[in-house]
Amino acid sequence: MIIICLFTFNFGDQSELVAYISFALTITSLFLALISIIYAFYSNMSLSQTLSQLNSASNKVDESSNKLNESTIKLNQQIENIPVLLKSLEGKVDNTHKLVSDVYNKEIIPKDASTTVISKEIFDKFYKFSSPSGLLALYATYLSFKTKKKFSLSELEYSTSLIKKDYTNGFLVACSSFSFFTRKDYSEDWVIPNFNKDVSENIKSELEKRISEMDEDDREYLTHEKNLIEDFFED
């Protein structure tokens, strides 16, 4: 304010200088007004973009909220259905257990294996290609039928070193499917109600023949295993 007063007092009588200064101030004012207009226009655009982004974000929040509500409704419906599904599943499990129990405990009585006719060719190939432990297991099955003594594969495995439970089970199942013998049921204990006549007449001799064809050490070992099986069914 002081500078303006001093400037006016000293140069107020110079009309041309005053005109120049007035013109310069006018130009400056116009320039500042133009800058203000441009800034206002830029600020308005930025505000519009910000409002647009805010509106878009708000719409996304609304969509997410609607989806969350839908998911909540579906989840509630599924939760309400869980007891029904569990009850249905429980019924199916009970039916499955009953079915398995019926199959497991049901007495299987196939045709009488003792009267089944098996060709000599099958017998010859069977005796030729069967393992010594397999023939020994079949011999044990025959002794079970002969002595009417039931047995379990675990007992045989414990009594001898040659017989192994898993292999013996597979071998005897195959023999049963050939009608070499009939097994009463599928319990842990094996009960043999009947035995094929031809097999029963030849299994011991075929086993002894196989033993005789081996070298001395194996022959002694298999003879010992055979005696253990016989002792098991004589007790």
Image (spheres, rainbow, N blue to C red):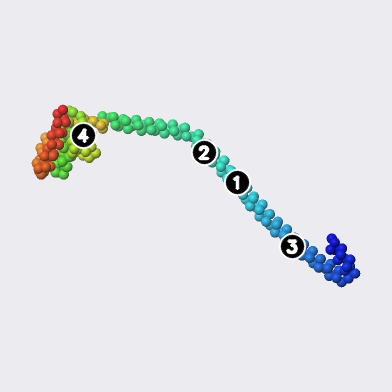
11 displayed left or right of 47: right
Q: Residue furthest right?
A: 13
Q: CA distance from mark 1 to mark 2?
A: 20 Å
Report the amino acid beneath label 1.
Answer: Val
Q: Is there CB contact under 8 Å for labels 4 and 1? A: no
Identify the residue at image location x=67%, y=56%.
46
Q: Is there CB contact under 8 Å for labels 3 and 2? A: no
Q: CA distance from mark 3 to mark 4?
A: 105 Å
Of the numbered discs 4 and 1, the one sitting upstream in the chain is 1
Report the amino acid beneath label 4.
Answer: Tyr
Of the numbered discs 2 and 4, the one sitting upstream in the chain is 2
- Tell me residue 92's x, y (percent): 39, 33
- Tell me residue 175's x, y (percent): 19, 38
Q: CA distance from mark 3 to mark 2?
A: 59 Å
Report the amino acid beneath label 2.
Answer: Leu
- Mark 1: few, some, or many residues within 10 Å (few <14, many ≥20)? few
Of the numbered discs 3 and 2, the one sitting upstream in the chain is 3
Quickly name the residue at label 4: 158
Of the numbered discs 1 and 2, the one sitting upstream in the chain is 1
- Residue 71 lies in quadrant: top right
Q: CA distance from mark 2 to mark 4?
A: 57 Å
Q: CA distance from mark 4 to mark 1?
A: 73 Å
Quickly name the residue at label 2: 75
- Mark 2: few, some, or many residues within 10 Å (few <14, many ≥20)? few
Of the numbered discs 3 and 4, the one sitting upstream in the chain is 3
199 displayed left or right of 38: left
- Tell me residue 128's x, y (percent): 14, 44
110 displayed left or right of 121: right
183 displayed left or right of 18: left
Q: Nearer the viewer, mark 3 or mark 1?
A: 3
On-image quarter of the N terminus:
bottom right
Quickly name the residue at label 3: 35
